[in-house]
């Protein structure tokens, strides 16, 4: 998904592949336990990306590195910036250890950019993006690659956005298809996957795999209600489009999304529906 977006947004920019952390969600284990199990493999990837960056900097004469939550992309001889909205991880009983590890890497960077509002009463991430003990932190405001328009009419009843790692993405997709099949509302499902599916679109229900930025912007603008995961990128998009009728489905076992969903329910009046209760949704 990321490579498709980069190719669309920056078609002429040189791209160098780096091994992904490849974090996969369990269908039943909390993410904190899954990360513990995968910790040694992830540590090896961090070591590899650190060495790869040294080669990239030398070969391409890089003078600044901006790392989007990649722990190993720092270099001692050039300016390095780390982007994250998680300065204070909300991870249940593992929060203390997770924050110690995260801060260990954050402090290797010259600057930290936080895509959130500096004023706490406007914050999209709540306590996640606050850590008064960190220096060189700059709040750069929410980021969104989409472009809202004020001239589009809200003629789409529901927009369902599917995102995130497997198997949770497919689990959610299966339930979404069951829900919309019973409805006569105008609905669009954005899958974020090119894996074939068996759902048959009709005049009122459409399924799109990978919409362009313009397509997705149009759909976001047209939607009266948006149903999606409570991942931070999705929340920043919702903010850009000033959407107020929102249904958030936190990914099962991911404490960050659970915290964000709860925070958005209290702060922005979003509605939370737990994944186990999805079959009870009625599209009014």
Image (tube, grey):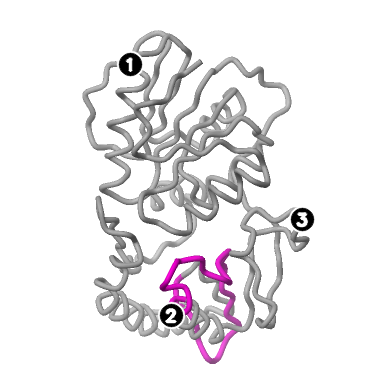
Q: Which mark is residue 181?
A: 1
Of callouts 1 and 2, the N-terminal one = 2
Name above or below for residue 87 compared with residue 161. below
Q: Nearer the viewer, residue 102 or 29?
A: 29
Q: Position of residue 235 (x, y in %)?
A: 57, 46
Report, in whole angstroms, how far the alpha carbon at label 1 lies from the one at label 2: 44 Å
Q: Which residues are magenta?
A: 70-98
Mark toward the viewer: 3 or 1: 3
Residue 119's spot in the image, x, y percent? 78, 61
Distance of label 2 from label 3 (alpha carbons): 28 Å
- Comparing labels 1 and 2, the label whose residue is closer to the camera: 2
Tag 2–tag 3 contact (CB < 8 Å): no
Q: Quadrant of residue 42?
A: bottom left
Relative vertical location of residue 46 with respect to residue 211 in this rendering, above or below:
below
Name the residue beneath numbered marker 3: 121
The correct choice, above or below, for 39 with respect to 34 in the image is below
Q: Secondary structure at mark 3?
A: helix
């Amino acid at each position: 998904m990321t490579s498709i977006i980069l190719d669309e947004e920056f078609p002429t920019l040189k791209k160098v592949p780096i091994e992904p952390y490849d974090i996969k969600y369990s269908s039943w284990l909390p993410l904190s336990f899954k990360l513990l199990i995968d910790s040694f493999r992830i540590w090896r990837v961090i070591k590899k990306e650190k060495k790869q960056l040294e080669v990239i900097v030398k070969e391409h004469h890089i003078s600044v590195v901006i790392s989007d939550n990649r722990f190993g992309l720092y270099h001692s001889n050039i300016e390095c910036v780390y982007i994250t909205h998680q300065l204070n991880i909300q991870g249940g009983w593992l929060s203390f250890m997770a924050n110690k590890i995260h801060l260990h890497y954050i402090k290797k960077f010259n600057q930290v950019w936080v895509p959130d509002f500096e004023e706490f009463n406007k914050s999209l991430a709540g306590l996640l993006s606050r850590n008064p003990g960190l220096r060189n932190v700059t709040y750069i405001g929410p980021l969104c690659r989409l472009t809202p328009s004020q001239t589009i009419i809200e003629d789409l009843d529901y927009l369902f956005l599917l995102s995130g790692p497997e198997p949770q993405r497919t689990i959610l997709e299966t339930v979404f298809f069951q829900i919309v099949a019973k409805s006569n509302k105008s609905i669009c499902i954005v899958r974020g996957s090119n894996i074939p599916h068996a759902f048959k679109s009709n005049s009122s229900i459409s399924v799109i795999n990978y919409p362009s930025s313009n397509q997705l912007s149009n759909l976001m603008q047209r939607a009266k209600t948006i149903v999606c995961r409570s991942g931070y990128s999705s929340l920043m998009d919702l903010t850009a489009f000033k959407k107020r009728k929102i249904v958030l489905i936190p990914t099962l076992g991911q404490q960050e999304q659970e915290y964000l969903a709860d925070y958005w329910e209290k702060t922005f009046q979003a509605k939370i529906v737990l994944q186990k209760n999805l079959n009870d949704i009625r599209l009014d």
